Image (tube, helix red, strand yellow):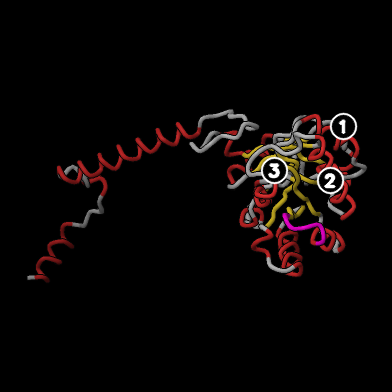
Amino acid sequence: MTRTRPLTIAELRARKGRGQLTMLRVLTLDEAAAAEAAGIDIVSAPFDLVSHPRYRTVAPGLFSMTGVDHREAGTREDYLRFAGRALLAGADALYCSAGLDTVRYLAGEHIPVVGHVGLVPSRATWTGGFRAVGKTADSALALYRECLAYEEAGAFAVEIEVVPPEVASAISARMKSLLLWSMGAGAGCDAQYLFAMDILGDHTDHMPRHSKVYRNFAAEYARLQQERIAAFSEFKADVDAGAFPEPRHLVQMDAAELAAFHAALD
């Protein structure tokens, strides 16, 4: 059923344990519109997209999270100001990569906060780089305690990234209210999260193990580039040969007016 508004946090929490929602990272209005038409539930999107004047026209029913890297955000007060702008612009939640004190501060101001556990790109050096987290009993317990801490701090959800599915499922089942959004952490969480660019195959960079490519946009882009080059080459050839422009591409002048123009020039 097509939604006319996003799910509320109360509705998202009420669905906990009742199956997975779908979540995408989208970067363009076209991707947001496609997510809306496809019935996707949740998206993560850059602030410039969520705040675009047409965003809610094309995506009225998407629960939309945006954020700013804590390394750029500034103070907690700066973070709060950004969150306020984002929510007023149409976002539904704020992704926060900062520490738990900042999460607690924002949640205390009734900002819907989403945290991040597991493989967190901005903190990957602490967990050994871009690799799975939670593969030992000790690291899995640390993940569990981190999720408990996020719940206590007031976050309503966390992204859980590249974690063994058994670990993610066990943690999710033990959270009272915290939602777990899985990226490479199995089907036992509350939402399944992928990047639109990976689903569409619109890049030739490394494809993460947890992603699935459903289309080959990169090949289509390459084909279109060859068509672009061919069109430009044909245009150049026409100009070089005097075949462009043709009379049908030009504005015609009345013969009498043209004669008067030439007489005035002479």
* Rendered view: 111 above or below 42: below
Mark 3, residue position: 119
Q: Could you say where residue 196 lies in the image, as x and y percent from the top left?
A: 61, 39
Badge nearest the viewer, 2 or 1: 2
Magenta span: helix, strand or loop, mainly?
Answer: loop
Q: Earlier in the sequence, mark 2 or mark 1?
A: 1
Q: Could you say where residue 81 lies in the image, as x and y percent from the top left?
A: 74, 67
Pick the residue in front: 90 or 12. Answer: 12
At a point 78% along the width and 50% down the height, the residue shown is 114
Mark 1, residue position: 18
Binning the other alpha carbons within 10 Å of mark 1 as few (below 14), some (14 to 19) or many (20 upward) gives: few
Binning the other alpha carbons within 10 Å of mark 3 as few (below 14), some (14 to 19) or many (20 upward) gives: many
Q: Earlier in the sequence, mark 3 or mark 2?
A: 3
* Rendered view: 145 above or below 110: above
Q: Could you say where residue 32 lies in the image, as x and y percent from the top left?
A: 64, 44
At label 1, the amino acid type is Arg
Residue numbers of the magenta segment: 97-101
Pick the residue in front: 192 or 246. Answer: 192
Q: Earlier in the sequence, mark 1 or mark 3?
A: 1
Pick the residue in front: 133 or 100. Answer: 133
Work out how far the residue at label 2 is from the one at label 1, CA to CA, in angstroms: 20 Å
Please tell me whether residue 233 belongs to the stretch shown in magenta. Answer: no
Label ID, residue 147: 2
**Local SS, label 1:** loop
